[in-house]
Image (spheres, rainbow, N blue to C red):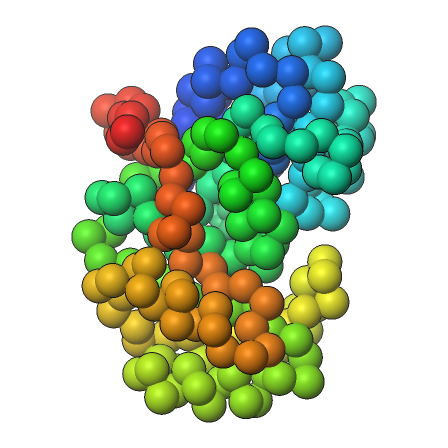
Amino acid sequence: MTQDELKQKVAEAALEYVKGYSILGIGTGSTTRLFIDCLADIKNNIEGTVSSSNASTEQLKKLGIPVLELNDVGTLDVYVDGADEINPNKQLIKGGGAALTREKIIAGASRKFICIADDTKCVDVLGKFPLPVEVIPMARSFVARELVKLGGQPVWRENCVTDNGGQILDVWNLSIVNPPELEQVINNIPGVITVGIFAMRPADIVLVGGADGVRRIG
Ligand code: 5RP
């Protein structure tokens, strides 16, 4: 099976996990894109969604699925999103699609976070995927120097402006053995908007698509 076929399988499997909920949090990325397409089949049961990016918002609206403001809906029952890396504790690296800030906000505002991914995303230790860090533009070089002190090699993702007007540094060569600790350390650097470690609020359930079917963790 190709990676895209695995993503399709896991996107379809996630549908079962959101039936019965009327307001859904929606992530960003190619796996989530497939999940959004699946939502079209049950759209009459969906009162609304809270979207983590302009791209997902546009797709949802095209399908006729309402998009609501997080400020208007309060705590969400469920949030579905992909990931770039997943460790056995359901801690994640996210932000490959530059939507990490709104993704982290919605994950934090949701009772249940369901992560959907193909099995190439599963690792023992986070950090092979370059860690995305969203920064205030004027702080980019300063934050980069601080990240070098932590042992990383930050690379500016040029030509990328996030939905919040931020910029992205992709940090290579970090072996993230203590994800919650590093999440807090990087969060504390002035100028950092969001770090793409999702460990203080990890996923609750991970659905992993592999050649043998969809495996559930959690
Ligand atoms: C976007 C993300 C995505 O969830 C992550 O990059 C995974 O994307 P894909 O489903 O395309 O592999 O964090 O900011």
Q: Nearer the viewer, residue 193 or 151?
A: 193
Residue 106 can be seen in this image: yes
Does residue 185 sit above or below 81 in this rendering? below
Q: In the picture provided, is 140 more to the left or to the right than 197?
A: right
Task: Give the residue displayed 77% in from the left and 33% down from the top.
Answer: 72
Please give the name of the residue rendered at 68% of the width and 69% of the height, measured from the top-left corner: 166
Determine whether 200 is above or below 173 in the image.
Answer: above
Residue 55, located in which quarter of the rendered image?
A: top right
Q: Does 144 appear above or below 40?
A: below
Q: Quadrant of residue 216?
A: top left
Quadrant of the image containing the N terminus = top left
* Residue that appears at 62% across and 50% down: 102
Q: How many marks?
A: 0
Q: Viewed as shown, does residue 158 lie left or right of 112?
A: right
Residue 141 or residue 191, whichever sits in front = 191
Q: Position of residue 128 (x, y in %)?
A: 30, 64
Q: Residue at x 59, y 67 (%)?
A: 193
**Residue 80 at x, y percent in the picture:** 51, 32
Report x, y in % for residue 147. Answer: 42, 82
Up-down relation of residue 31 to residue 121 (above or below): above
Say which quarter of the image contains residue 149: bottom left
- Residue 11 appears at what percent x and percent y? 48, 27
* Residue 175 located left or right of residue 193: left
Closer to us: 164 or 201 = 201
Q: Name the quadrant of the C terminus.
A: top left
The answer to whether residue 51 is left or right of residue 96 is: right
